[in-house]
Image: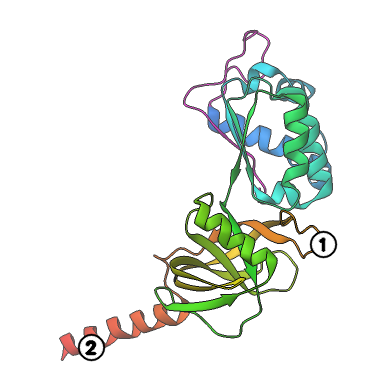
């Protein structure tokens, strides 16, 4: 199914009560498939009439998840009924899991807080690039990867962003959200700072475009000592794959290959 919860582990699933465990004779691939259906809230799937009670019971056993790395995709966080099912299962059954990786999502914090409240020692991590400080300003310009450009920053939230860079707490990288619509999946560019110059109460910042990205999750961070000022946006992003060709580049590659083939035939 589309929204699957992946379960990563190097061995077969055998609980302490293997003789009664519904999963004890199954390999990890089969177990992952079954648990994915359970977590994704089967009431959403009209084609499924019922679930074997032994299977449902096994999914709630602590031993079924022992040592597992559970990878939760965005689609399980998108739908409230699936998110609720995920919280119910995880807060009753995942105490023996090794790690839970939650996809970056604006509802991730809710699930993470429920998990940490239920299992304080559980390692809960985020699948996403970041977090990055986000400079938000609409731009119609299409920046190329490797291009060098600059900004003059003077708002308190962006002065704070640069102060953090100078302090070394966030590296020398920030995100520029160029398609800023106040919604999920905004687009932008990742900026690597190459030069900084303080001008009074502002900064001139030169940087190189490192990648394009989509915003996966964002939240507000108050500016220290300036709580009345607009907050700085922080967020996790998904970087574009630099190895993937755009549609135009792909067409160009195909045309060049066809021209080369025709010239060889001649």
Res 110 → quadrant: top right
Magenta stretch, overall SS: loop
Identity of the residue furthest to the bottom in this view: 266
- Left or right side of 213 for 206: left
SS under mark 2:
helix
In magenta stretch: residue 15? yes
Above-or-below relation of 142 to 237 = below
Q: Position of residue 240 (x, y in %)?
A: 50, 64
**In this rendering, does residue 82 appear at all?**
yes
Q: Residue at x 74, y 35 (%)?
A: 38
Q: Is residue 160 above or below residue 73?
A: below
Residue 18, image quadrant = top right
Q: Nearer the viewer, residue 102 or 139?
A: 139
Question: Left or right: 16 with respect to 259?
Answer: right
Q: Residue 32 at what x, y percent from top left? A: 60, 33
Which x, y percent locates residue 70? 61, 34
Q: Which residue is denoted by mark 2 in the rendering?
A: 262
Let me know if residue 62 is in the magenta part.
Answer: no
Q: Which residue is mark 1?
A: 228
User: How many other residues sit within 10 Å of disc 1, few (<14), some (14-19) or many (≥20)?
Assistant: few
Between residues 132 and 121, which one lies in front from this camera angle? 132
Q: CA distance from mark 1 to mark 2?
A: 67 Å
For marks 1 and 2, the one nearer the N-term is 1
Q: Which residues are magenta?
A: 1-27
Query: Nearest the camera: 135 or 108?
Result: 135
Give the x, y percent position of residue 80. 83, 48
Residue 81: name its quadrant: top right
């Amino acid at each position: 199914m589309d929204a699957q919860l992946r379960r990563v582990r190097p061995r077969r699933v055998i609980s302490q009560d293997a003789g009664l465990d519904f999963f004890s004779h199954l390999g990890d691939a089969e177990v992952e498939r079954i648990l994915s259906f359970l977590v994704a809230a089967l009431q959403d799937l009209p084609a499924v009439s019922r679930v074997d009670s032994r299977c449902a019971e096994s999914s709630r056993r602590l031993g079924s998840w022992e040592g597992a790395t559970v990878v939760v995709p965005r689609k399980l966080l998108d739908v409230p009924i699936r998110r609720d099912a995920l919280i119910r299962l995880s807060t009753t059954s995942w105490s023996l899991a090794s790690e839970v990786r939650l996809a970056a999502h604006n509802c991730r914090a809710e699930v993470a807080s429920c998990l940490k409240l239920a299992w304080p020692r559980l390692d809960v991590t985020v699948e996403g690039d970041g977090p990055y400080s986000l400079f938000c300003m609409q731009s119609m310009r299409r920046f190329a990867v490797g291009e060098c450009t600059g900004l003059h920053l003077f708002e308190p939230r962006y002065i704070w962003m640069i102060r953090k860079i100078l302090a070394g707490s966030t590296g020398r990288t920030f995100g520029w959200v160029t398609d800023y619509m106040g919604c999920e999946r905004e687009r932008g560019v990742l900026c690597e700072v190459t030069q900084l110059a303080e001008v009074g109460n502002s900064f001139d910042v030169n940087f190189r475009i490192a990648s394009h990205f989509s915003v996966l999750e964002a939240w507000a961070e108050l500016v220290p000592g300036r709580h009345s000022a607009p907050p700085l946006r922080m967020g996790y992003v998904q970087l574009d794959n630099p190895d993937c060709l755009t549609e135009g580049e792909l067409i160009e590659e195909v045309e060049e290959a066809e021209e080369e083939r025709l010239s060889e035939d001649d």
